[in-house]
Amino acid sequence: MSRLRRMPPRRRSYDQYCAAARALDAVGDRWTLLIVRELLAGSRRYTDLHADLPGVSTDVLASRLKDMERDGLATRRKLPPPAAAFVYELTERGRGLLPVLDALATWGAPELAERRPTDAVRAHWFALPLLSLFDQLGTPGTVEVRLDEGVFHIVLGDGAPVYGEGPAPAPDARLVLDADTCRAVGGGALAVEDGVRDGRIEVSGEGGIAKVLRGE
């Protein structure tokens, strides 16, 4: 008896001639936008993505990444020796989802009023709520943010602001604060200069963005 050839599953679609429906065809599955959030911080290995997406199964993560490659949102490439590892990164179309994630973060900020005991947290997850806030200051520069949970940085200047995981090579400003204070700043409940005055935020650096953040 010949072995039946397994056919790939049919891609689910809303089958609606609507821009929002077409967008959700590509990014509406569970975990997809959170993978985009991770890749907006830079190229990531599969193991790094799995570590920073607590709760996702290996099968689902692999499936979503394949879908994102198929839909032109992400690519996979091999790093040169000695690393010789594969990394995933967003395409230009994938990076175009930054305003979408930014808007979702702004809309969802009130839901962070209470942290549940089961909630995982990574420092760079706080970058999204800060992007628009810092970009509105109109001062270019790189801001490094240090929390107990880790470090991330935001680059402001020409074009859309971007963020990355880990410290910046030469930040124009460095902020040291706790997660609750960072949430308050990102949600608009606390201005950075007020946090500095109250001793909740430490801002160091002599760049223009540091002076603006200190209210000088």
Image (cartoon, grey):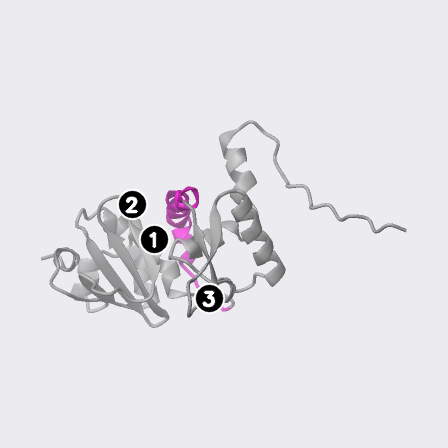
**Callout 3–callout 2 Cβ contact below 8 Å:** no
Q: Is residue 178 left or right of residue 7?
A: left
Q: Residue at x 78, y 48 (%)?
A: 5
Comes first in the chain, label 3 or label 1: 3
Looking at the rendered structure, the secondary structure element under dot 3 is loop
Q: Name the residue tied to disc 3.
A: 84
Q: Can you identify the residue that label 2 sits on? A: 160
Residue lying at 59% horizontally and 29% vertically, measured from the top left: 16
Predominant SS along the magenta part? helix
Percent across and percent down for residue 174 are 21, 65
For this rendering, which residue is in front, 171 or 187?
Answer: 171
Please say if the residues under marks 3 and 1 sit with CB atoms less than 8 Å apart. no
Kind of residue at disc 3: Ala
Which SS class for mark 1? helix
Q: Position of residue 139 (x, y in %)?
A: 17, 50
Disc 2: CA contacts within 10 A as few (<14), some (14-19) or many (>=20) = few
Residue highlighted by disc 1 = 129
Q: Nearer the viewer, residue 128 or 141?
A: 141
